[in-house]
Amino acid sequence: MLGIGKSFDVIKLDLNYADRDMAIFFIDGFIKDDLFLQIMKFLANLKREELDLQPLEKLLRRYLPYVELEATDDLNKVADMVLAGPTALVIDGIDKVILIDARTYPSRGPEEPDIERVVRGSRDGFVETLVFNTALTRRRIRDRSLRMVYTQVGRRSKTDVVICYLEDIADQNLVKDIKASLDKIDTDGIPMAEKTIEEFISGQHWNPYPTVRYTERPDTAAAHLYEGHICIIVDGSPSVIITPTTFWHHLQHAEEYRNKPIVGAYLRLVRYLAVWASIFLLPLWYLFAVQPNLLPKSLAFIGPNDDGQVPLYLQFLLIEIGIDMLRMAAIHTPTSLATALGLVAALMIGQVAVEVGLFSNEVILYLAVAAIGTFSTPSYELSLANRIFRLLLLTATAIFHIYGFVIGTVLWVLLLVNMKSYNIPYLWPFIPFNLRAFLDVLVRAPIPLKRQRPKILNPQDPDK
């Protein structure tokens, strides 16, 4: 079943202790050598008469000095467990296999995630090892009701997945729905880890807006667990899924809560302005540029002084594609060449393009502001979705002018209104409207005044 002899890293070691033939099966690289050496020393000291009566019980309770032990007669389970990392001990005369979970995985340190940095705050982040991530979460939540429910996803990959929630707070019906969603996943494997999980449980495959939130910060995950959210931790990924979430969850950042409330409220307001600018600034400026009669005389300066040699819409489209090309190039560029790439891009896209008349100065200015707003969005998935909508709205405005802008905006709002994340309205508390919750979304309130959990999550304990 394990393909012994066909794969060099699947190892069978034949042994003889206490006059009994034994064999251990393990994956090279998944075993703690020093720990297992100690276990083998204990086995080597066993005498024959010590295993004459009830050998399995004696081994589990006395002679195998390790914590995580399990005995099973299910060979399919044994094969799956060995491939996942534990070691199987098979002993002649015993009708069960002993599983010793002394595994270790190649892993990096819990460093601060690049896309969720803060000036003040913890510098640790989730890593690609499941057990490390559950430990980082439990370090911040010492609640007796914290539950880590283990399951596996993928017929062939058998990927470890953990559903994390606070049993005394989270809506148990929601927990059941998420468990049912994971159980329904029927695929060979999930090599893209949490992203594949999201596509299976969220649906709406052609909708670019994310219905779950990702985080690589343990403190962010803990804060959402206290509110009544549920986290899904997938082995092999440093990103933890937070669900259910609304549109406004993707606009919040830990930096707001690492400063005084008034500073945090200011940062949130600036972030909202940046996000709205990233969506509407370019289509709105294009509309005023092609229809200057819509502007009052006091704002007549808005619009291009020089249209350039290329139509405005095509200028925007070319620069949008150029920025995406630059972004992808930056991902694949070695760090030592990143500065050179930035200089080349600035010269080519900026100065030279304007001098030859390909782009106008105003187009580059407003697109730069929109790009800054895109990068100011805390959620990478939301920023990409906003960018796609910006292109669609710009195209509709270019074709139908004011009607395209208005109708496109209305259709965008209707799209968000009809979205749900596990029956949670995506625009709550704006639609349906809840004044207290909306004020909490709009302004970063002091923590001592936030005494209630979001009602939309139906928490068992509504008060903090």
Image: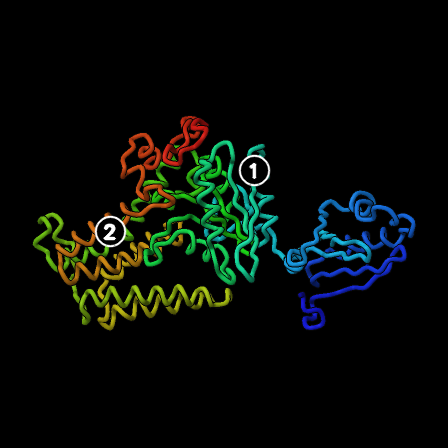
- In this view of the protein, which residue sits in the foreground, 288 or 107? 107
The crowding category of the residue bearing disc 2, from other C-alpha atoms within 10 Å (few below 14, some 14 to 19, many at least 20), is few
- Judge by depth and name the residue closer to the eye, 155 or 315: 155
Residue 349, above or below 207: below
Residue linked to disc 1 = 140
Q: Identify which residue, 359 or 146, lies in the foreground.
A: 146
Mark number, residue 412: 2
- Amino acid type, residue under disc 2 in the picture: Trp
Q: Which mark is residue 123?
A: none
What is the three-letter code of the residue carrying label 1? Arg
Q: Is 151 on the left or on the right of 252, as rendered?
A: right
Q: Are marks 2 and 1 in contact (CB under 8 Å)?
A: no
Q: Is residue 339 left or right of residue 9?
A: left
The part of the image, by quadrant, that contains residue 322 is bottom left
Provide residue 248's location: percent of width, then percent of height.
35, 43
Residue at the image position 39 percent from the left and 51 percent from the top: 202
Q: Where is residue 415 in the image (x, y as percent from the top left)?
A: 26, 50
Q: What element carries label 2?
A: helix
Q: How many labels does the image show?
A: 2
Q: Please indicate, yes or no, whether residue 372 appears anywhere in the rendered image.
A: no
**Which residue is at a point 27% across and 56% down the rendered structure image?**
389
Of circles 2 and 1, the one toward us is 2
Residue in the image at 32% along x and 30% along y? 436
Secondary structure at badge 1 equals helix
Compared across the picture, whether 8 is left or right of 383 comes to: right
Determine which quarter of the picture holds residue 24. bottom right
Q: Please name the residue shown 39% across and 33% down the image.
A: 454
10 Å crowding of disc 1: few (<14), some (14-19), many (20+): few
Pick the quarter of the image with the N terminus. Answer: bottom right
For the residues labelled 2 and 1, the Cα–Cα distance comes to: 38 Å
Q: Where is residue 283 in the image (x, y as percent from the top left)?
A: 21, 56
Q: Nearer the viewer, residue 253 or 404?
A: 404
